[in-house]
Image (spheres, rainbow, N blue to C red):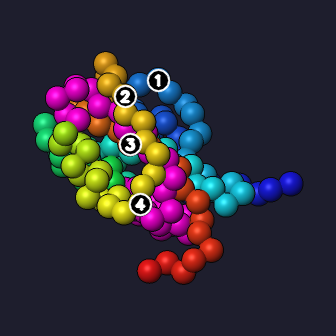
Amino acid sequence: MPTHTRIRPFNTKETYPEQNLDNDLCQAVVANGVVYLRGQIGQDLETRESVGIGDVSAQTEKAMENIAILLDEAGSRLADIVKVTIYITDPQYREAVYLVVGKWLKGVYPVSTGLVVSALARPEWVVEIDAIAVISALPVA
C-alpha cells in the first residue's frame, strides 16, 4: 500500500483561533509521486500572519512564494505543476492576479481553473491558489 507524506501538519484551532474548529490538516500531501497543495493565500507559512492586506498583487506573490516553498519541501518544483486553481473575490482582480501567476509559471503551461467566489476564510484574503504537481525524475535546476 502506498505511503503518503504529509508536509507541515497543523490543527485549525491554532490557525483559526477565532473560530470553533478542530481539524487536522497539512499544507501538502505527497501520494504516488503527486503533490497536492492546500490553497495558498497571502499568509506567512511560519508566522501565520496575513501579508499584503489590501493589495491583491502582494497576496498573490506570497501565495506563489508559498507554493514554491512547499513544492521544494515535497521534492518537486514550480516546473512540475500540472494544475492550478485560482480563487478571487472580485472579477476586477483577475488581471493583477494572473500577471503575478504568469510570472511565476512562465513556460510551465499547467491547466488552470479560475473562479470568482463571494469570500475566502478570512475577510482580508482576496486570492487563494491551489496547485497539483508531480515529482519529476529530472534533476531540479
Q: Where does the magenta region start and end?
A: 65-94
Gap in angstroms between the C-alphas marked 4 and 1: 40 Å
Task: Decide if residue 140 is on the left or right side of residue 137.
Answer: left
- Kindly identify which residue carries mark 3: 129
| Nearest-to-viewer mark from 4 and 3 | 4
Question: What number is the disc on residue 115?
Answer: 2
**Circle 1 SS class:** loop
Callout 4 amino acid: Val
112 in the magenta segment: no
Q: Are marks 3 and 2 in contact (CB under 8 Å)?
A: no
- Marker disc for residue 108: 4
User: Is residue 26 rendered to the left or right of residue 31?
Assistant: left
Up/down of 114 relative to 51, above or below: above
Residue 101 position, x and y percent, is 29, 51
Q: What residue type is labelled 3?
A: Ile
Q: Which amino acid does label 2 sit on?
A: Leu
Residue drawn at (51%, 53%), measured in percent from left and top?
A: 82
Q: Does dot 3 land on a helix, a strand or a loop?
A: strand
Q: Quickly name the residue at label 1.
A: 20
Upstream in sequence: badge 2 or badge 1: 1
* Outermost residue toward the top in this view: 118
